[in-house]
Amino acid sequence: MTTAFEPVSLAGTKLSNRIAMAPMTRSRAYGPGAAPTADTATYYAQRASAGLIITEGIQPSVIGQGYPSTPGLHSAEQVAAWRQVTGAVHAQGGVIFAQLMHTGRIGHPSLLPEGLVPVGASPVAAAGKVFTAQGPQDFVTPRELTDAEILTTIGDFAAAARNAVAAGFDGVEVHGANGYLLHQFLSTNANQRSDRWGGTVTGRIRLTVEVVRAVADVIGAHRTGLRISPANPFNDITEDEHRHTYTALADTLDPLGPAYLHIAEADDRDLTRELRRRWDGPLILNPFTPGTVTGPEQLALIEEGTADLISFGGLFLANPDLPARLAAAGPYNTPDPATFYGGDARGYIDYPTLDGSPSAVS
């Protein structure tokens, strides 16, 4: 029986355990030009005991930003700043992937350079509001991407992946989940196109497939992961054919040999198991868990073969030494939602380790 504390090979390297840090937006890219800071390096280095760290969403282009103070990977300045982060993680023996996230219609003109508006698969506004420097604002109707702009967007992901490797990342996770651009194309409500990028399951999965292929062409499939969230309605997503969509996506991409498939699970364990059967490579699962996440139930999914790694979000945010705490069955620090997004070092790099002392890396 395989346990969470055994090593596993991924992206050409051996991970020390099967516990991953899930990507979490923190909105603290206060460096010049949307670059991470020294605190960012400390934050990730404190959590380097994870088998794999997946960063917060990083925009591959200016137009891909949907929240305040999120970092990019599309300038030399940003690459240099991220190099300090990866260096700090590697110094602690960690492995770190950059998550590339284009938010698409989830954003606001006030977060973009003057004259730009969010873009999407179709001119369909998401229901709800987005947080901006001026407070919550209604989502606007996005501008529909042209065929040529879609090809440019694919190129932006590839260029950002190249920058990620230059910045010292061990690989890249393409964000195809949570209602952002690629997920919008996968959906049946945000994507109302009738061209090659929509209309059918084959059309709707095309952008995600082409982005993963483009990234793999640049950095190697073995360093390219994909995150999906089947049947997750977050950010006003509807998927009328979600089982067909995601089995087709898995069947199309599996022969490429990506580093992993990362599933942010909705309440559909049967689909997770079906994707597991169809996917030959490593599978990371962020499990659907009603109530409080405590660890043992999630780690048992590795033992039963449902996943190769389990990713933790809020629990890792508040517990920089989470693998040690899981091995000891706790106790756990409680995450503070008031400090999740923006702010200073509080709730970012000051959560104590298991022995009660401040986090070891500073």
Image (cartoon, helix red, strand yellow):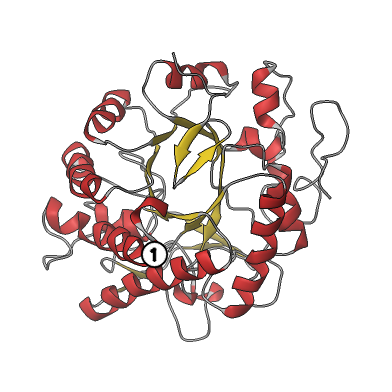
Judge whether 262 appears above or below 99 on screen.
above
Amino acid type, residue under disc 1 in the picture: Arg
Question: Residue lying furthest bottom in this view?
Answer: 115
| Res 145 visible | no
| Residue holding disc 1 | 105
Please provide percent x and percent y for residue 179.
38, 52
- The front one of 28 and 94 is 94
Q: Image point 59% across, 79% down: which residue? A: 76
Please provide percent x and percent y for residue 177.
38, 49
- The front one of 300 and 25 is 300
- The front one of 162 and 275 is 162
Please provide percent x and percent y for residue 278.
22, 34
Left or right of 182: which side holds 95?
right
| Res 333 visible | yes
Give residue 71's quadrant in the image.
bottom right
The number of numbered badges drawn on the structure is: 1
- The front one of 267 and 211 is 211
Give residue 353's quadrant in the image.
top right
